[in-house]
Image (tube, rainbow, N blue to C red):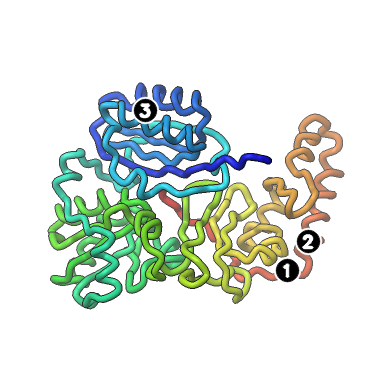
Amino acid sequence: MKYEQQFTLLTFYKFVDVKNPEAECLDHLRFTKDIGMKGRVYIGTEWISSTVTGSQGQIQAYKLYLQDHPLWKDIEDIDAKSSLVDGHQFPRMQVKVRDEIVALGAKYSAKEIDSAGNRMQIDEFKDLLDNGNIDDYIVLDMRNNHEYQLWHFKNAIPADTLSFRELEDKIEQYKKEFGDKKVISYCTGGIRCEKSTVMMQKAGLKNTYQLDGGVVKYINTYNDGNWKGSLYVFDDRVSQIVWDENTHSVIWECIYSAKKTDNCENCRLSSCNARIIADREEYLKHAGFCSQQCADNWLETLVIRTDLSMDNMKYKEKRGVIKRYPELKDNIEIELRMHLEKQLKWVDFNHKVSQKEDFIMD
């Protein structure tokens, strides 16, 4: 009988003052690669953020390594935000230095983060959504507008930003719109809200709270339908279906049609790579391009990712042949253009320009 090994996706962060992030990255990479984990870890002078996958033994070894480390020990919610997955969700193990934990344009010490406080526990938040007077509160989605449109908590409003760096310019607007109401902010794992709470409080929005543990902790604890749609995740899954057939909801339409779908894809044009919501059949029909502009761009540059699930044309190999045998360039380019033009002959795009947006790791 074949033994099916269980894998876990572990995601966490910790604000901590790090004197030498370069050295910590090297040590972290050595350990995680030695035990066979895969994922992404970022370390900076103010923090560590980690999203990794591993077998039960690898995850246990990693947690022991963290607990024995003077900087990484006592990480909150390390188990509450973990989830079972069907194998590794990353192609490799990467550990990198990043100046800011998220690109807010302001850095805060661990002491400043801790002093901001005002964490609303998930059980209190659930009670508010289910039974409270929600009109006395503002539930503020701190992710970018695109993510909010795809999926969010009921009664939530967007922060009205395309990137996190825009937040500072929005705070005066929030003061006017929110008045004396309590503001509860949330994000995927909690990182953005840690920093945004400090920034908003420093700017005079004192009545601000942050959802402790973010969306991940909430949906790992409750199955109640208060979260609408799926969840954007920062690994090879792209999106995670939230809850079961009785509580899951689909709130977004395919960019090519009116079909309701949770399916996430990337625009196949490498220079665009936009994250899009697209019915899989429609995505294949449109050759993986998010817009007419991207399809036209491909016909101009012939730079596209090979996707054998979409067609059997090995684009990268064809370009390699051109490099080795320049005399074949014209014939191969004609072949490639004819192939794609045939695919797109009867296709119309709803969007004329690239749908690329900035996504921020959380």
Question: Which residue matches tag 1?
Answer: 347
Residue sitting at 61 percent across and 47 percent down? 270
Q: Label 2 near label 3: C-beta < 8 Å? A: no
Position in image of residue 87 (x %, y %): 57, 43
In this rendering, position of residue 196 left or right of residue 225? left
Q: Which residue is mark 3?
A: 65
Q: Nearer the viewer, residue 118 or 75?
A: 75
N-terminal label among 3 and 1: 3
When the figure is inspected, residue 226 is found, relative to residue 296, above or below; the finding is below
**From what the image shows, is residue 133 above or below residue 25?**
below
The quadrant of the picture occupied by the N terminus is top right
Count of marks overlaid on the render: 3
Indicate which label's residue lies in the foreground, 3 or 1.
3
Q: Quadrant of residue 329?
A: top right
Secondary structure at numbered mark 3: helix
Q: Amino acid at mark 1?
A: Val
Residue drawn where x is 77% and y is 56% of the image: 340
User: Which of these two is toward me, 51 or 333?
Assistant: 51
Q: Position of residue 260 (x, y in %)?
A: 57, 73
Query: Tag 1: Cα neighbours inside 10 Å, few (<14), some, or many (≥20)?
Result: some
Q: Going by the image, does 28 lie left or right of 198? A: right
- Apparent side of residue 30 relative to residue 159 in the rendered image (left or right): right
Give, as a three-letter code, the residue at label 2.
Answer: Gln
Disc 2 crowd, CA 10 A, few/some/many (<14, 14-19, 20+) = some
